[in-house]
Image (cartoon, rainbow, N blue to C red):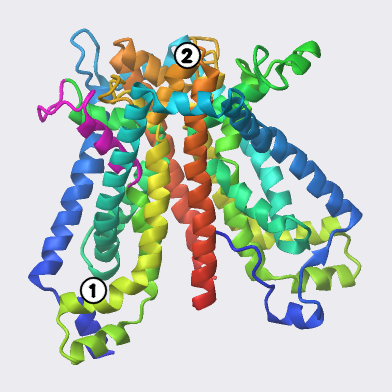
Amino acid sequence: MAEVKEIRQHKSAVTYLLRFFVIGYLFVLVVWPLSEVVQRTFAPVEPDAAGGFGAFLERLQDPSVTYAFGLTITCAFWAVLINTVFGLGISLLLVRYDFPGRRILSVLIDLPMSVSPVVVGLALVLAYSSGSGWFGEGLESVGIFIIGSTPGMVMATAFVSLPLVIREIIPVLEEIGTDSELAASSLGANAWQTFRRITLPSIKWALAYGVVLSLARSLGEFGAVKIVSPGAEFRGETATLLIQNRYTNYDESSAYAAAFVLVLAAVLALVVVTFIRRPEDRT
Amino acid sequence: MTDVLAPPAGPARTRRPSGGPFRLSTASGIGLGIGLVWFSILVLLPLAAVVGAAAAGGWSAFAGTLTDPQTFAALRLTVVEAVLVTVVNAVIGTVVAWVLVRDDFVGKRLLDVVIDIPFALPTIVAGLVLLSLYGPDSPVGFNIVNTRTGIFLALLFVTLPFVVRTVQPVLLEIEVEAEEAAASLGASRFTTFRRVILPSLVPAITAGSSLGFARAISEFGSLVLISGNTPYRTEVASLKILKFLEGDNQAGAAAVAVLLLLVAVVVIVGLDILSRRVARRG
């Protein structure tokens, strides 16, 4: 073991060179720009904008900003709820059951993560817009409008974060196998009891992990939502759309204030995820 | 990639000699039906509508859109930028993973968290983050707005974690014995890396690079504020789709979208095959 340690801990000039290169690269690419965002949130560069924490809070309390965050949270809530229920069901089916087309389905499930958000938005428009979509007219005749309203934005959000829960649960389901579940059902437990008492407790960390990832992704979705939303103030403008609109309309300080909140949410999600992963790793 | 076809663990297998998972019962069949209907409504039908809209005008309309000089320039820029970013990531991502696994210094844990930040940030915020340092009123006097360098930097930012996060676990599992043997036989550290370590990292680097490439090709949010969207110069494929859509040219938008979709499908299927191969070998 001593020799192994020696190899691992042998520090040549190359080791130091690589270390400082990596630190420098990450600093210039991520850390420094990020710190500049914090700087500009509390000390805007615009000449007439007030600085400080009070001004930051004031910008967030603007009705159009609270509307935007409210809409973002609504969309994220429904998208995460739908993806969690769907993800649990599909994961159980994919791992525990055998049916034709199972492998194709398992590959297709991953597709939404790799499709460009713009393509996602375009796809929903081409399928459901009341003007030109495949099903637009039919839905319009029964009074359902998807594009340009909240249901469309929920769908866009659900689309892009669809595989996150499934990806986390499937490996755990495969690992735990079916022994305990079979034992429970042979002792007379029904399907729901088996799920709630046996399956759910063993996948709860993976599920929580997937839910946090979906939530983070949903709160930050931009491209797909941009295309299906009317995107105007008080009309379908989510937090991410607000950032774009404000920045391009020379209201940088509001853009940075909203962005800072989303940065905080993202960092919080990262921290939560690290804490969730730890107990999982220990077992 | 998740490998759902892996057989269940030992004991369960002996109990069910058939080996495969359960047959569908009525209840699970209904569940599968509902799941598939929702998946079709949300994903499959809309994507089919994209393909349909692209094919509606026939091959000549499709090819005409893509060979239009302005569209073609956007596609070429997208591919060139994505290839450049992928090459840089393959090298730097491996180096970062190497340092995170093999080196040890104060603040390494923090660096590990920093890697995930580009994934966690909303894409529009990622664009804003870069603009705060490298945009107008840049404190370092370096404005990337409406330049190809800006697009490159944004893509580098959003694809940072892919190679790092695929190479890292593989590097953690590599046995040091093989390296030791190589070193004791007189191989230099570089030779050891090239001949012993690198070959076992190649599948992970390939997987991470393909994911990064797919992401770079389809990137939208982080480029909206940075790319000035100037035709022939800084217009990329995803922004071209938006422009087509805003100009009410849905067939044009769909034609470009089908190309992006194709890249996504090829990468996913390729990775699925790759992961199966690696699993079989290991």
Left or right: B65, with B116 as reference point: right
> Label 2, label 1: how many angstroms apart (C-alpha)?
50 Å
Total residue callouts: 2
State the residue at coordinates (55%, 67%). B276
Q: Nearer the viewer, residue A50 or B264?
A: B264
Q: Which residues are magenta?
A: B137-159
Q: Position of residue B145 (x, y in %)?
A: 22, 24
Q: Which residue position is annotated with label 1?
A: B194
Q: Amino acid at mark 1?
A: Arg
Q: Is residue B83 left or right of residue A142?
A: left
Q: Are marks 2 and 1 in contact (CB under 8 Å)?
A: no
Would you place residue A164 above or below residue B193 in this image?
Answer: above
Q: Does dot 1 land on a helix, a strand or a loop? A: helix
Are the residues under marks 2 and 1 on the same chain?
yes
In the displayed structure, would residue B179 be above or below residue B261? below
Residue A249, image quadrant: top left
Question: Which residue position is annotated with label 2?
Answer: B246
Query: Disc 1 is attached to a residue of which chain?
Result: B
Q: As drawn, which residue projects farthest toward the bottom?
A: B185
Q: Is residue A152 above or below residue B201?
A: above
Visible residue check, residue B234 = yes
What's the mark number on residue B55? none
